[in-house]
Amino acid sequence: MIRLNAGFSARSGAVCRWLGALAMTGGCLVQPVLAAQDAALEEVIVTAERKFRPEVSTAASKFELPIIETPQALTVLSSEFLDIARLNDTASVVAYTPGVELGGIGDGTQAAISARGFPINRERGFRINGLSTDSELDLDYFAMDRVEIVRGPASALYGEADYGATFNRVLKRPSNTFAALTAVEVGSYDFRRVQADVQGPLGGSGIFSGRATAAVQDSETFIDHTEDDRILFAPSLNIALDRTNILLQGYYQKLEGSSSDGFALLPDGNGGYVLPDLPRRRNYGSTANEIDSENKFFYAQLDHELSDSLKLAVKAGYSRVEMHNASSFLLGSDAAGNQSLLGYPEYKTKEDLSVDASIEKTFELGGRDQRFLVSADWRRNELFNPWYGVFSLGTINIFQGGPQPVPGGIPPAGSVDGEYRSSKQDFSGVTVLTHLKPTDRLSLLLGARYSSVKTGIHDYVPTASGYIRNIDGLDDDGWVPRVAAVYEVANGHNVYASYSKGIVFNQTFLRANGSPINPESGVQYELGVKGEILDRRVMYAVSLYRITRTDVAAGIFVPGQPDVYYNVGKQVHEGGEFEIIGEVIPGLNLVASYSNLGIDIRESANPAEVGHRPYAAPRHSYSLFATYEFLEGPLRSLTLGGGVVGRSEREVDSVGSFQLPSYTRVDFRASYRLNEAMLLEFNLQNAFNEDIYTSVYQSPNLGIAYAYPRTMFGKLSYRW
């Protein structure tokens, strides 16, 4: 607690904002203690807190609703929590999100994520500021104000979407209060990073405000001969007029370095597999591996109040991903550990252009405010992929070392035979939603969406027989409903029930006659309880769900011929999730979760999948992260904390070939505020050096890799 004297009470709000900027707080409580009427000064008591808990989100409803009144499982992680828990990317965020699991990281750039047992597609499962963007390259979360994970189908809001979850990353935006941060961080494996975040008013009119977030990182990784270097720059400008607000934002990220994609499991001689005992630092790849990729994103948003009850919002975004990577991976193994090393040049460009416009009307009915929203959106996604095949680089024995020297490097795209593909897809849709309050305790969220897609594909495979496939004008459409109800059973405690449907068009999966297969469908029923306890400082949420997926895509692959697909399959995923977040007592903040997931694959194109679980879908997962800040006494300004993350066994594929072992990871964290501006932090991740394995490619025959061993980081930051 910080005790100040202020000359007059009108300053208390400014003092609070100033102290919040210095103390890296999410909130500030100001209580004036009134002195005698003729006193010259009044006392202001300021309590600083680090606030893990956001309270409002639009991600699961498109309406601005309190999270406890949102009838769907929703996790929102604030920028304060991301910073304190040192969650820099999607791969690290999933550790503290119930029902979400990391499969692995492929090619050093691509996080493979599953939610509620379903893989999240990079092109439809990730968004920035609510707009679809390609996520072939993971983002740097220092630029994010918050991360919103909507679990379950969200097609009624966004169109084509995955059944397990949708990730929305919200960029930091400016405010009219000046604040600045600089930080220097060093750590294990020659990790070095410098970052800065500056925001405030531009000019004296109060109309313009700006913000710039930047970071430069130079680092090796725990694997020999690999690096993770990056540059981040994210500027933004806000223009606040009388009834209109305009927000302009940009995001630029460059990744350079190299990676290793792990190894294959060893055959056990009985048709199964065993994990080899290998050094974590060994590089099982080639010296020619290289990452050279860029991610650019530009965003504009206009909010205009047409009247006190009618609001217009227009959002537009453009993203461009350029990948010029050369990677290699090991495939298959004999009992002695001899594995084939294959090279893979990945030269790819993806572009996304999205526009979303909505009108929200508030009207009174029955003495209560009701809301109605209509939105229309359009997205164009284009891919140019001169992918020229996988080819042999020799053989490596995983017990004798690596990486494999490749004289001249991995051949660039165009120098070897393989496949070429380009595609263009146009998505569009109209969403109608209403949020009704029939009684003071009951609210309804009702809606539906119509979506359509048009696709053009060009394929060329120069083989002995060869084929060229040019298809334009593929189109499909469909609609999905959304029905949900929330009932307040007691003050601050709500129960909800929801029905939602997901749709995946599978336009690029073609039958033998060249027509697309039927869309996949996923239907979810969810029941839950959300509420606030401990004087509303802590929020809890419990959800029970059942998702049925049908018309799954299955393929027939013949070398030198177009791939042929068809619809087959039915699977049922059901489970329960629990999470709690907030300030338990003054100074003690926590985020905790538990998930239980049951899966029943009933029909499949591959009979071996029936009765087994898909990959990266542990039955049990749990996490806890907590910090305690000493607010008084001799240890004042010291914060101690850490996290525990646990997972039960996970399958490496969907036919029960092998289970990666369970694990419990423990992290520690400490910080000390040297003065009002300077903060010294220490992080120890995987403190007990637990062996943690990942499987990125859904196979025992490639892509088995270690997660990070024990790592240490120290950071010094300065705020003013």
Image (cartoon, helix red, strand yellow):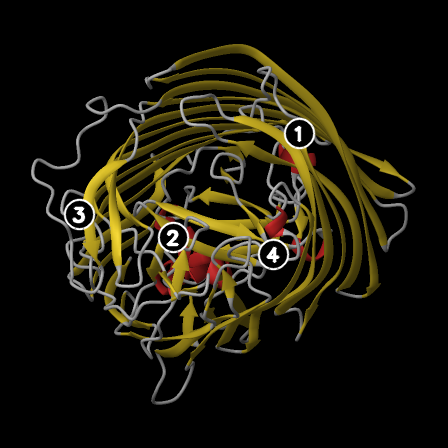
Which percent across, then down, holds residue 384?
Answer: 36, 21
* Dot 3: element: loop
User: Which of label 4 and label 1 is nearer to you?
Assistant: 1
Q: CA distance from mark 1 to mark 3?
A: 40 Å
* Dot 2: element: loop
The residue indicated by pointer 2 is 701
Q: Label 1 amino acid?
A: Pro
Q: Neighbour class for label 3 at 10 Å: few (<14), some, many (≥20)?
A: many
Q: CA distance from mark 2 to mark 3?
A: 18 Å
Query: Image point 58% across, 59% down: which residue?
Result: 99
State left or right for residue 371 relative to residue 65: right
Q: Neighbour class for label 4 at 10 Å: few (<14), some, many (≥20)?
A: few
Q: Label 2 amino acid?
A: Asn
The residue indicated by pointer 1 is 519
Query: Image point 51% across, 68% down: which residue?
Result: 649
State left or right for residue 637 relative to residue 649: left
Q: CA distance from mark 2 to mark 4?
A: 45 Å
The residue indicated by pointer 3 is 286
